[in-house]
């Protein structure tokens, strides 16, 4: 199946089954099954391309040491870190960048700085990953979230005693849906999918338990999250609904028609989906249009076009990294798909080493594969012609502003390049489907021929053309208009 075919298949499941009635405790199950069916398929598909075995997720029982550490983390939070906070933020380490020798959340730190400086508002950021040995920007407003989980997990398991798993048997035609998934996607057995969805539902309830205590202690009005479809953020959204807190998902990348987490929710309960955010914050109108195509038909979820805070932040800085090079930069932002580098891309790099400086930026989920990328470049004899370190470490908007052309298959960087007036080349059919607006307004050009000489000719043409910049909305204006009481 192609990506479009799998998305269409999942959409047809939504039409065929009573997915709007599938509820376990207060968790609406369909968004979990919808999103995870796609990611299960995607992961298996990419593993097969790489000929490497799929590593199944192991559900581990918390150790005594983890429980003690978690107990101490709760004590620290409740009696030291917790305070009345109007704005709560939560994001993973992957959204951090190194800026001025400090680790910043590129979307949330600019927003928190604005709220604190302009409105004297109190903000807390719940870091989804364990804190590392880094110089964190404004460390005093960061609360490590992960260590709160083990004790909460033990408590919820002890008090529910398998009740969650039992409720799945009463969901109308749920098992029929699993059978159809297994029939159409043989690598996804009904037993595997059900086990994972049950586990995820249980885990969402644990994270909701965690955020229930956080919200009761901090009493926020708004909770901003990144990548709403992680288990932590689904739990936060559920808790926000329980506690009458407005949950907001900040756009972090592509949100096109082929992204199952953002497109085609056409059948939903009258109350909306309990684990989806109340508000979707989008960088631009084309991204918002995908979500508005279904939110416009109900009253429980809505969309705001709020701009990209990181681009706004860097535009206001007097001191930003300086990039010096004697050649024009061609930036290629990768996606975690196979092959990592197509043969025609390698050939194009080899043929243009005297004309351009190629920068290749790994996707956040690929950062541990840097050595594999270097190995691929070495095999073609061009490892010294490509800059990987700066491409992965410097702020993306800064690199884009110094780039002549940006290439990608379907990275959200295409939107950011468009906002900054940098010409894009979209080199994958998924990207063509996802970035129709950018292709129609001229900020991006599609190239699907997989021919090095043709690609070089297009790069040469675009490198000498001024890009079409799109409107970059100021996030401060949107915060002021919508989130300042």
Image (spheres, rainbow, N blue to C red):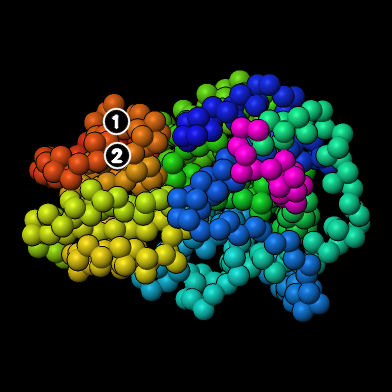
Mark-to-mark CA distance, 2 and 1: 9 Å
Residue 364 in sight in this render: no
Badge 2: residue crowd in 10 Å (few <14, some 14–19, many ≥20): many
Question: Which is more N-terminal, label 1 or label 2?
Answer: 2
Give x and y (percent) for residue 285. 41, 31
* Placement of 344 over or under 429, stated as above or below: below
Question: For mark 2, what is the residue?
Answer: 426
Foreground: 118 or 113? Answer: 113
Residue 353 got which mark?
none
280 with respect to 188 (left or right): left
Which of label 2 and label 1 is nearer to you? Answer: 2
Question: For mark 1, what is the residue?
Answer: 439
Give x and y (percent) for residue 56. 65, 57
* Placement of 395 over or under 186, stated as above or below: below
Residue 199: in magenta span: yes
Look at the numbered disc 1 and give the secondary structure of its residue: helix
Residue drawn at point x = 27 percent, y = 36 percent: 448
Q: What stretch of residues is rendered in magenta?
A: 183-201
| Screen quadrant of the C terminus | top right
- The image quadrant of residue 346 is bottom left
Foreground: 19 or 326? Answer: 19
Q: Main secondary structure of the magenta part?
A: helix
Give the number of marks: 2
* Placement of 436 over or under 348, stated as above or below: above
Q: Is the C-beta separation of discs 2 and 1 under 8 Å?
A: yes
274 with respect to 120 (left or right): right
Give x and y (percent) for residue 204. 73, 50
Look at the numbered disc 2 and give the secondary structure of its residue: strand
Give x and y (percent) for residue 160. 90, 53
Foreground: 24 or 136? Answer: 24
Badge 1: residue crowd in 10 Å (few <14, some 14–19, many ≥20): some
């Amino acid at each position: 199946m192609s990506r479009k075919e799998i998305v269409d298949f999942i959409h047809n499941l939504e039409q065929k089954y009573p997915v709007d009635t599938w509820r376990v405790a207060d968790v609406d199950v369909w968004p979990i099954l919808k999103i995870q069916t796609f990611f299960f398929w995607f992961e298996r598909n990419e593993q097969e391309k790489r000929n490497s075995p799929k590593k199944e997720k192991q559900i581990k029982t918390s150790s005594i040491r983890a429980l003690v550490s978690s107990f101490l983390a709760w004590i620290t939070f409740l009696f030291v870190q917790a305070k009345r906070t109007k704005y709560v933020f939560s994001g993973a380490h992957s959204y951090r960048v190194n800026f001025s020798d400090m680790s910043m959340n590129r979307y949330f730190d600019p927003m928190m700085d604005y709220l604190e400086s302009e409105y004297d508002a109190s903000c807390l950021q719940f870091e989804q990953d364990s804190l590392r040995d880094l110089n964190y920007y404004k460390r005093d407003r960061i609360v490590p979230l992960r260590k709160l989980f083990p004790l909460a997990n033990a408590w919820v398991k002890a008090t529910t005693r398998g009740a969650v798993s039992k409720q799945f048997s009463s969901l109308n035609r749920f098992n029929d849906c699993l059978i159809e998934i297994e029939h159409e996607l043989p690598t996804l057995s009904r037993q595997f999918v059900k086990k994972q969805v049950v586990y995820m539902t249980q885990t969402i309830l644990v994270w909701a338990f965690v955020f229930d205590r956080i919200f009761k202690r901090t009493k926020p009005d708004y909770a901003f999250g990144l990548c709403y479809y992680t288990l932590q953020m689904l739990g936060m959204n559920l808790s926000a609904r329980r506690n009458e807190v407005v949950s907001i998902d900040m756009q972090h990348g592509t949100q096109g028609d082929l992204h199952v987490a953002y497109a085609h929710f056409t059948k939903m309960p009258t109350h909306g989906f309990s684990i989806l955010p109340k508000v979707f914050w989008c960088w631009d109108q084309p991204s918002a249009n995908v979500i508005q195509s279904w939110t416009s038909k109900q009253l429980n979820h809505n969309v705001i076009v709020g701009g990209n805070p990181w681009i706004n932040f860097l535009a206001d800085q007097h001191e930003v990294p300086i990039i010096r090079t004697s050649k024009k930069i061609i930036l290629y932002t990768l996606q975690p798909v196979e092959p990592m580098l197509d043969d025609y891309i390698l050939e194009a790099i080899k043929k243009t080493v005297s004309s351009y400086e190629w920068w290749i930026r790994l996707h956040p989920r690929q950062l541990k594969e840097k050595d594999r990328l270097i190995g691929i470049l070495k095999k073609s004899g061009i490892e010294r012609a490509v800059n990987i370190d700066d491409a992965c470490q410097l702020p993306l908007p800064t690199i884009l502003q110094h780039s002549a052309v940006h290439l990608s298959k379907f990275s959200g960087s295409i939107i950011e390049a468009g906002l900054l007036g940098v010409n894009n080349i979209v080199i994958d059919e998924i990207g063509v489907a996802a970035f129709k607006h950018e292709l129609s307004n001229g900020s991006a050009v599609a190239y699907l021929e997989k021919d090095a000489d043709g690609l070089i000719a297009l790069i040469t043409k675009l490198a000498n053309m001024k890009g079409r910049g799109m409107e970059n909305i100021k996030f401060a204006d949107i915060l002021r208009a919508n989130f300042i009481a």
